Image (cartoon, helix red, strand yellow):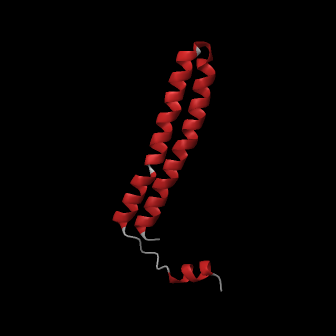
């Protein structure tokens, strides 16, 4: 029997909701920093080359959505963990 199967058999599914909240809070730091870096790069790029503003904003909002999906996945996992499913 593999280690993964043994770990799955011993896990009872009860996670402390407080620990899940701390885990989500730490997990939300990454997307927060990512969004800040994305829009800082857009401001910097627009200041250097104003005619590229439209392309930079389109790219920024696309990557913003991808980064925010990570935060939304994190909050869904938090609710699953705190529900004890």
- Which corner quadrant holds the N terminus? bottom right
List x then y, in percent, for residue 74.
48, 54
Which residue, as the protein is rendered here, is positioned at the far bottom? 1
- Residue at image position (37%, 64%) is 19
Taking the spot 46% from the left edge, 41% from the top edge, the residue there is 33
State the residue in front, 16 or 37.
37
Q: Residue 83: image x %, image y %? A: 42, 67
Q: Which of the two residues, 31 or 83, is positioned nearer the viewer here?
A: 31
Q: At 61% across and 80% down in the image, what residue appears?
A: 3
Decide which of 69, 52 is in the foreground and name it: 52
- Give the left or right position of residue 73, taking residue 26 as reference: right
Position of residue 35 measured from the top left corner of the image (x, y, whole percent): 49, 37
Q: Is residue 30 above or below residue 59?
A: below
Q: Farthest residue in the top direction?
A: 51
Q: Residue furthest left?
A: 18
34 displayed left or right of 20: right
Q: How many marks?
A: 0
Residue at 54% across, 25% down: 42
Relative vertical location of residue 4 with respect to residue 67 in this rendering, above or below: below
Whether 54 is drawn above or below 69: the answer is above
- Looking at the picture, how far across and down is residue 23, in whole percent? 41, 59
């Amino acid at each position: 029997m593999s280690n993964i199967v043994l770990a799955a058999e011993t896990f009872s599914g009860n996670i402390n909701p407080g620990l899940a909240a701390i885990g989500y809070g730490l997990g939300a730091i990454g997307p927060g920093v990512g969004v800040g870096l994305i829009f800082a790069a857009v401001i910097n790029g627009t200041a250097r080359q104003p005619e590229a503003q439209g392309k930079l904003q389109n790219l920024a909002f696309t990557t913003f959505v991808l980064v925010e999906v990570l935060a939304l996945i994190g909050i869904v996992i938090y609710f699953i963990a705190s529900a004890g499913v």
